[in-house]
């Protein structure tokens, strides 16, 4: 923590002066291993950034699931899911993960309920394009991407975050 604290403070002081800055991105996918380490980092980040800029929210992005317990959501005002649909796994459409729309609906409903429970704002991460060409040889088309976006918004997302969007539309 100590090694990154001065940088986090410097960045926060810079970003808080930017009028078009929306919020801060906490530890990525804290529900993945090593959980204790990631959760401790999320707490440290929150306690470092929030006193310097209490007016902007901090986002926690989870991989498909938020474990039970308030300790998983207390370090963010915005909660999001990153779900990674994979249409190439089953081109016939027979698997759940091969259907970006259905997958988004399922996880958006799940996330909405958790946000309601913990009084948090919901964001969603629709899959953009190719994540890793070796693992995902077929990217998502614009219809897949729009379907995910609309499904997440219909189920209550107040924001969408894209990690890769440069060459798909």
Image (cartoon, rainbow, N blue to C red):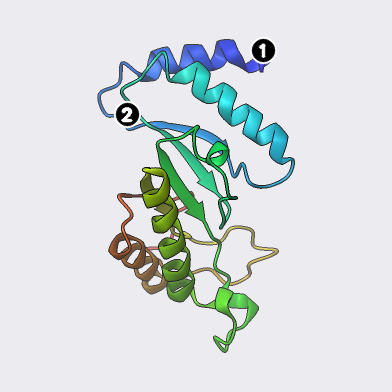
Of labels 1 and 2, the one closer to you: 1
Q: Position of residue 10 (x, y in %)?
A: 48, 11
Position of 22 relative to 114 (above/below): above
Q: Which mark is residue 21?
A: 2
The secondary element bearing badge 1 is classed as helix
- Asked whether the residues under the numbered discs 1 and 2 touch, taking CB atoms below 8 Å apart as contact, a structural biologist would say no
Q: Residue furthest left?
A: 19
Q: Position of residue 169 (x, y in %)?
A: 36, 63
Q: Quadrant of residue 36?
A: top right
Task: Of the two numbered discs 1 and 2 on the same chain, state the one appearing first in sequence.
Answer: 1
Position of 21 relative to 118 (above/below): above
Q: Residue at x 37, y 18 (%)?
A: 53
Position of 82 relative to 45 (above/below): below
The secondary element bearing badge 2 is classed as loop
Crowding around mark 2 (Cα neighbors within 10 Å: few <14, some 14 to 19, many 20+) is few
Crowding around mark 1 (Cα neighbors within 10 Å: few <14, some 14 to 19, many 20+) is few
Q: Quadrant of the N terminus?
A: top right
Q: Residue at x 50, y 32 (%)?
A: 75
Please say whether residue 31 is visible from this viewpoint.
yes
Q: CA distance from mark 1 to mark 2?
A: 25 Å
Q: Residue at x 46, y 35 (%)?
A: 76
Please say whether residue 161 is visible from this viewpoint.
no
Between 137 and 149, the residue placed more toward the observer is: 149
- In the rendered structure, the answer to whether residue 109 lies left or right of residue 61 reads left
Between 4 and 38, the residue placed more toward the observer is: 38
- In the rendered structure, the answer to whether residue 158 lies left or right of residue 85 reads left
Q: Quadrant of residue 21?
A: top left
Q: Which mark is residue 2?
A: 1
Q: Residue at x 60, y 76 (%)?
A: 88
Q: Position of residue 57 (x, y in %)?
A: 37, 31
């Amino acid at each position: 923590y100590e090694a990154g604290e001065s940088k986090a403070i410097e960045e926060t002081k810079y970003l808080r002066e930017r009028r078009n800055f929306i919020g801060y991105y906490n530890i990525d996918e804290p529900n993945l291993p090593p959980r204790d380490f990631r959760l401790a980092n999320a707490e440290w980040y929150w306690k470092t950034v929030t006193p310097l800029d209490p007016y902007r929210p901090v986002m926690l992005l989870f991989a498909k699931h938020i474990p039970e317990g308030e300790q998983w959501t207390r370090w963010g005002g915005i909660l999001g899911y990153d779900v990674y649909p994979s249409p190439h796994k089953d081109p016939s459409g027979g698997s759940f993960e091969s259907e970006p729309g259905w997958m988004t609906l399922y996880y958006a409903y799940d996330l909405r309920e958790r946000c309601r429970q913990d009084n948090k704002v919901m964001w969603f991460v629709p899959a953009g394009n190719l994540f890793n060409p070796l693992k995902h040889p077929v990217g998502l088309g614009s219809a897949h991407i729009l379907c995910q976006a609309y499904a997440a918004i219909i189920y209550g997302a107040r924001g969408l975050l894209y990690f890769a969007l440069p060459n798909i539309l």
